[in-house]
Amino acid sequence: MTSLPTMSLPASLLVCPVCSNTLEQYDKRWQCSNNHSFDEARQGYLNLLLAQHKNSKAPGDDLAMADARARLLDSGVYEPVSNLLNSNVQGLPQRILDIGCGEGYYTARLKQHLANQGCAAQIVGLDISKDTIRRAVRRDRDIQWIVASGARPPVANHSMDLVISLFTPLMPQGLEGIIHSDTDIILVNTGPQHLIELRHIIYDEVRLDTFSPIAKMAAAGFECVGEDAVQQTIHLTSSQHIGDLLMMTPHHWRVTQAARERLLAHTKLDVSIDVVLHRFRLSKNKIAIAGTESK
């Protein structure tokens, strides 16, 4: 006897990464109409990352990096970045996708921010790292956490009201199918002064590069409809927090051992936060073309 599906999310939200048919939940098993089946992990997340979409055996951040990020973010020093995101979410979006959610700090705080306004949003947190998703489940079991590729989000066509991505190289080609004409896409990236004090300690030369996603998004048919920023000094009061900050950045992979030791000799450090937020929507031309093609 087949049990009836128990839906924690609408049947139309998650889709099969193999055939893109709707996934339905049967207790701890998710299955599509083509009988592709995925078992929910005992920790409470769903792994929808196909082997051919991995770039390594264990892609993304490892457990040590996930734990370092969780410790630092839980200290509250990056709360201004979370507040920047939350203050730029317009309206009360019902369905939200966080691409590159990491261990879920920003995702969970956004959910609480919306709940305080009476919005019980349904949120999917997506990351390619199994270790970070395992940590994310600990934050909020009511968020649907999935291991998947941000280039191929396994969510239903035109289902998302809001897509967010913080400090993650976004692949806009994966967005078009999952959004609708009124979907906001919020990208958060670092500015030129971000962690400048830390960088001066670990590098002989520091470049003040500025990254903007506007050109890349415009080429994919998205226009920038809003921009905001936060610049603030945070105070790290232990070598543990300084080391955790290093581990949650790309500098962790680049720094020499000597530079790492030089940094960790500090027990206190004031560091600049320089973060820029851009909000995008499908361009009017893109919407018009899509409307013509659908006729």
Image (tube, helix red, strand yellow):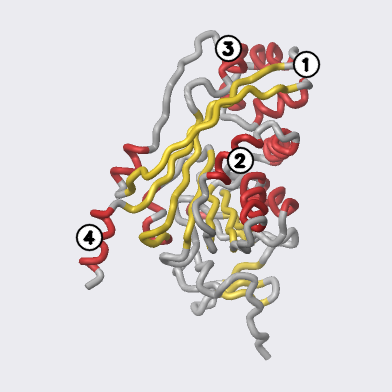
The vertical placement of 117 against 253, above or below, is below
Q: CA distance from mark 3 to mark 1?
A: 16 Å
Q: Earlier in the sequence, mark 2 or mark 1?
A: 2
The residue at which mark 1 appears reads as: 267
Are the residues at dot 2 and dot 3 in contact (C-beta closer than 8 Å)?
A: no
Q: Which mark is residue 97?
A: none
Other-residue count near label 1 (Cα within 10 Å), few / some / many at <14 / 14–19 / ≥20: some
Q: Residue furthest front?
A: 117
Q: CA distance from mark 2 to mark 1?
A: 27 Å
The residue at which mark 2 appears reads as: 83
The kind of residue tagged 4 is Ile
x, y (%) of residue 51? 53, 55
x, y (%) of residue 145? 63, 57
| Residue located 54% across and 31% down the image | 230
In this rendering, position of residue 277 left or right of residue 266: left
In this rendering, position of residue 238 left or right of residue 213: right
| Residue located 42% across and 57% down the image | 183
x, y (%) of residue 257? 66, 16
State the image quarter where residue 227 is shown: top left
Q: Earlier in the sequence, mark 3 or mark 4?
A: 3
Q: Is residue 62 visible?
A: yes
Q: What SS does tag 1 mark?
A: loop
Q: CA distance from mark 2 to mark 3?
A: 27 Å
| Residue located 32% across and 37% down the image | 215
The kind of residue tagged 1 is Thr
Other-residue count near label 3 (Cα within 10 Å), few / some / many at <14 / 14–19 / ≥20: few
Q: Residue furthest top?
A: 204
The residue at which mark 3 appears reads as: 200
In this rendering, position of residue 180 left or right of residue 265: left
The vertical placement of 2 against 75, above or below, is below
Q: Earlier in the sequence, mark 3 or mark 1?
A: 3
